[in-house]
Structures are given as structure tokens and as C-alpha cells.
Image (cartoon, rainbow, N blue to C red):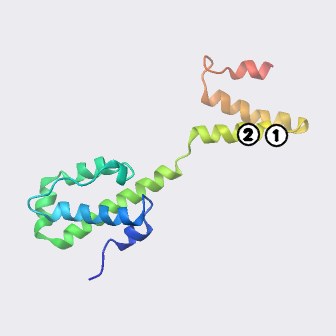
Amino acid sequence: MINPFSKFENFGVITDPAKRKNLAQSIYEQITRQPVKANTLDNSNTDNFATAIDSILANETMKNLCKNDKDLAEKITQEILDFINKTKKQINKTECPFEKESELLNGFNIITKANFNRDWSVVSSFIKNTYDDQELSGDFYEKE
């Protein structure tokens, strides 16, 4: 029998392969069993996706349909796993403002006197767009 979830298990972006395998099996079992056994998912083993998965799996109509149609259960499980992967990839791509600011500060620390005006305009623009005047006054530093 071919494992329909092997792509997620081997190449998923959350946790490790063993936990991904358990996650895929758990989702499939929860939507195909009657009655459903106690929830075995927790956020620490699912990169905090357990709550979202539980919300999806709470749909009684979906579970009733999946109990009678194993192909549908596989398809829905795969859709949930794809949702997890795509969401995690998007989270990983999202730019962290702290990291951007830290990189900008580190770069500004090593500028030369000749490049000051050019580099300061980038930093000044960042300060004005990121902070309000009560937090950090870009105008004050511009004057200095």
C-alpha cells in the first residue's frame, strides 16, 4: 500500500519526520473513526498547529462523510497537511522587524565617513517609518 502522506512526512517543514508521520496518521484516524478517540495532538508536537487542526476536525459533517469514504478522508487529510506546510512556509518568509532593524544597526555601525550621508538616509527613513516621535524622534537625530 502506498502511503498518501509520505511527501508531507519526508519533506514537511514542521518538526521532524517521526512527528510528521504521527500527525498525518492522527488526523486521518480522527476523521475516519467512529467514535473518535481522545485527541492526541498537542501544540508542542505540531509547531502550534494543534489548535487549528482541532478546529478543522471539529466539523461533524466532514467526519461523517469521511467515515464512509476513505478516499475523501485521504484527500481532506492531505489538504490539512498542505495547509500546515503552506502556512509554516509563509510564517518563515514573513520578515521579522527586529531582525531587519538589527541588520540595519549592524550595517550602520561599520559605515565610513564618506558613506555616512547615503547610509544615514536609509536609517533615518527606517526610524521615521517605524517609530512615532514619542518613541524615537527621527527629526531629532536628523538635526544632530
Q: How crowded is mark 2: few (under 14 residues within 10 Å), some or many (20 or more)?
A: few
- Which residue lies most toward the right here? 114
Numbered label tally: 2
Looking at the image, which residue is at 72% across and 30% down? 124
Question: Would you place residue 13 above or below residue 94 in this image?
Answer: below
Q: In which quarter of the image is residue 25?
A: bottom left
Looking at the image, residue 61 sits to the left or right of residue 42; the answer is left
Q: Where is residue 88 in the image (x, y as percent from the top left)?
A: 43, 54
Write down the residue under mark 1: 110
Which of the numbered marks, if any, corresponds to residue 39? none
Q: Residues within 10 Å of mark 1 (few under 14, many from 20)?
A: few
Q: Where is residue 87 in the image (x, y as percent from the top left)?
A: 41, 53
Write down the residue under mark 2: 106
Asked whether the beta carbons under mark 1 and mark 2 sit within 8 Å of each other, the answer is yes
Looking at the image, residue 37 sits to the left or right of residue 10; the answer is left
Identify the element where label 1 is drawn: loop
Q: Quadrant of the N terminus?
A: bottom left
Looking at the image, which residue is at 65% across and 21% down? 136
Looking at the image, which residue is at 36% across and 62% down? 19
Q: Quadrant of the C terminus?
A: top right
Q: Which amino acid does label 2 sit on?
A: Asn
Identify the element where label 2 is drawn: helix
Q: In which quarter of the image is residue 126?
A: top right
Q: What residue type is labelled 1?
A: Ile
Question: Would you place residue 98 above or below residue 6 in this image?
Answer: above
Q: Tell me the distance, in whole angstroms, between the alpha carbons under discs 1 and 2.
A: 7 Å
Question: Would you place residue 54 above or below residue 112 in this image?
Answer: below
In front of the other: 118 or 38? 38
Question: Would you place residue 58 above or below residue 98 in this image?
Answer: below
Looking at the image, which residue is at 83% across and 39% down? 111
Q: Position of residue 23 (x, y in %)?
A: 31, 61
